[in-house]
Amino acid sequence: MDQDFIDTLLLTGKLAGWTTAILFVIGFPIAYLLAYRRFPLKSVAEALISMPMVLPPTVLGFYMLMAYSPQGALGSFLQSVFDVRLAFSFGGVLIASVIFSMPFMIQPLQNGLTAIPKSLREASYTLGKSEFTTFVRVLIPNMIPSIITAVAMTFAHCIGEFGVIIMVGGNIPGETRVASIAIYDEVQAMNYQTANQYSLVLFLISLVILTVIFSINKRKITTI
């Protein structure tokens, strides 16, 4: 294995890892609001979060690229004030990846929260526990399978993403060239052996992740 192959896989893992970590932090509050709160335009919010599951990746990638452009309001502001360029950079790809992977984190967490009996929360509140304490000591321990599913699905989805990354980040070695783009590159160059190596690694990672998810869900069903 050459250094470029290793660097590409490390960059893929870096992107997937950071995306999953960021979404884990912001996903819980959003999932909690969607599961237990009523507010105006809640259905619109849920639809917007779920949009990446049905929207072609190139559509989101195009709009993200336009937003990052120095000719756009956001891109111009960031470049003039902070000297930050998001287009064709790892940071820009990371933001796009977080947005595009959002439903894969939030939906399993939301489903896990709504599946917890309301009586458990009410019992905790009756004992004088705060909402935060109830969340940490009652809700989280009772939704571990959902948490693992959310993290695994987000990571697996991210390592296979192609459309958003190629639109926003292009194909810059060491910066935005992840494994999915490398596969396309190698096939175009007729380097099928290298393309097969990338594909096999992604295939095995996805297989392991899905096996873990199905094993957890099967165990959860048998214990009910």
Image (cartoon, helix red, strand yellow):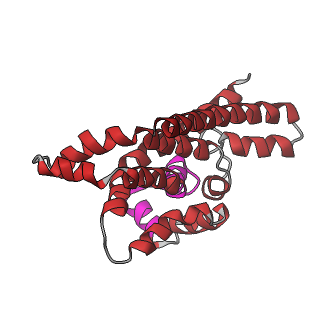
Residue 182, compared with residue 118, is above or below; it is above
Q: Quick one: which residue is furthest to the right in this view?
A: 190
Residue drawn at 26 percent across, 46 percent down: 135
Please indicate whether residue 175 sits to the left or right of residue 29 in the image. right
Please indicate whether residue 30 sits to the left or right of residue 131 in the image. right
Taking the magenta stretch, the answer to whether it contains residue 195 is: no
| Most foreground residue, 24 or 120 | 120
Q: Quick one: which residue is furthest to the left in this view?
A: 128
Question: Residue 177 is drawn in which quadrant?
Answer: top right
Residue 111 drawn at (x, y percent): 44, 54
Residue drawn at 26 percent across, 48 percent down: 120
Please indicate whether residue 152 sits to the left or right of residue 62 in the image. left
Task: Report the span colored magenta.
Answer: 74-100
| Most foreground residue, 129 or 24 | 129
Q: Main secondary structure of the magenta part?
A: helix
Residue 166 drawn at (x, y percent): 67, 54
Residue 11 visible: no
Residue 126 drawn at (x, y percent): 13, 51
Q: Quadrant of the N terminus?
A: top right
Residue drawn at 35 percent across, 41 percent down: 142
Taking the magenta stretch, the answer to whether it contains residue 87 is: yes
Residue 9, compared with residue 46, is above or below; it is above
Residue 76, compared with residue 22, is above or below; it is below
Q: Quick one: which residue is furthest to the bottom in this view?
A: 40
Residue 150 drawn at (x, y percent): 49, 45
Please indicate whether residue 98 sits to the left or right of residue 215 in the image. left
Residue 112 visible: yes
